[in-house]
Amino acid sequence: MSRITDSPVKDGDSLDAASLNTRFASYTQTDLNQFNHRDAAHDLPQFVNTGFMLTHAQSQEIGLNNWKHSSSVALNGMTTMPADASPVNNGSGTVTDMSFGALGINITEDEVFRAYWNLSVFANPGTKWDDASSLGYYVFPATAPGPTKKAWTWGAVWVTYLEWDVTSNSRANYVAVPGQSDFKTVIAGKYGAALGDMQASAVVPADLRFSNRPDAGVLGLSGDQGGQKWRGLSGAWFYTRPSGNVTCYGLRVVIKGIMHPFSNAGNNYLVHDTVYSDGASLAYNGGNLAVLKQRVK
């Protein structure tokens, strides 16, 4: 790192504004780069103007930003397959996506593209959790007057994930980002995605239902729907271009549900539970979508 040397003030030297400005001018650094500054001394966003490490940073509010939750956006569970994802919007039908302008943002193999999102959500499980066709429904022996009790796996979730448009600045052709499925793959007659194809996903529980602990394999009669609260959901996605470059014009968060874990032929998936979804819904308020593009080579 460069060292600044300056002679000390001597008897008779002027100490007016002009002389002081001249003396301290050597400490004014306007061209920070990898040779004259330690990157660990500052947060990366402070380097956006230098372009040598953080080449782009951007933030976008998403959803309906009402922190008191006096109003929210409601999304119904998806019962007809295959289903399209629902983009996060502001409650008036306007999708709150992130635009990268007319020229888009170029991502090369020398860079990593990082996206982070969060959202305030409230899950309404509806009444079909105990339908015999629901994927998480089970019946267990119960104490008198029994003889059985309905139970739930507690595995149902709503899924948020990222889509981008790499075709034009009209942002009319959104698709799931690389490494992320759109949950339209057919798996043993159901629609969903392998866990390995969910690199840009974040989930939130669709239900909080419980029963007393079993006694000798028998459930107690008391069970309860856990008190649902507004909660925060957050996700992250990193992308490195394997070769060449790609131009992204828009990025957005979308939602699907209700999903449930599913195993088939030794592989694990999340698949749509269309029975549970009937009558269930997810309410959401505001959040944030942020991106950072960094040089890695």
Image: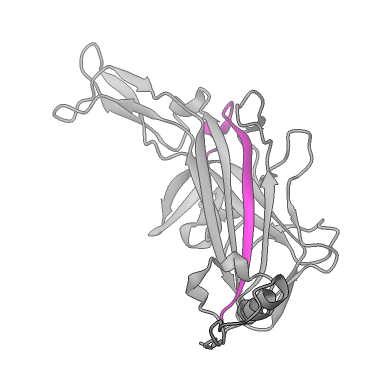
Which residue: 68% across, 80% down? 22
Residue sitting farthest toward the left: 216
Q: Position of residue 55 (x, y in %)?
A: 66, 73
Which residue: 83% across, 69% down? 103
Left or right, 185 with respect to 171, comes to left
Q: Is residue 198 above or below residue 244?
A: above
Which residue: 79% across, 41% down? 94
Q: Main secondary structure of the magenta part?
A: strand
User: Is residue 287 inside the magenta stretch?
Assistant: yes
Q: Position of residue 143 (x, y in %)?
A: 20, 17
Q: Is residue 184 above or below residue 273?
A: below
Q: Position of residue 109 (x, y in %)?
A: 63, 81
In the picture, the quarter occupied by the C terminus is: bottom right
- In this view, the residue in front, 74 or 20, is 20
- In this view, the residue in front, 2 or 24, is 24
User: Is residue 293 inside the magenta stretch?
Assistant: yes
Which residue: 76% across, 44% down? 95
Quadrant of the rendered structure where residue 218 is?
top left
- Is residue 236 visible in the rendered image? The answer is yes
Residue bounds of the magenta highlight: 271-297
- In this view, the residue in front, 293 or 162, is 293
Residue sitting farthest toward the front: 12
Q: Is residue 80 above or below residue 192?
A: above
- Is residue 259 visible in the rendered image? The answer is no
Left or right, 227 with respect to 295, comes to left
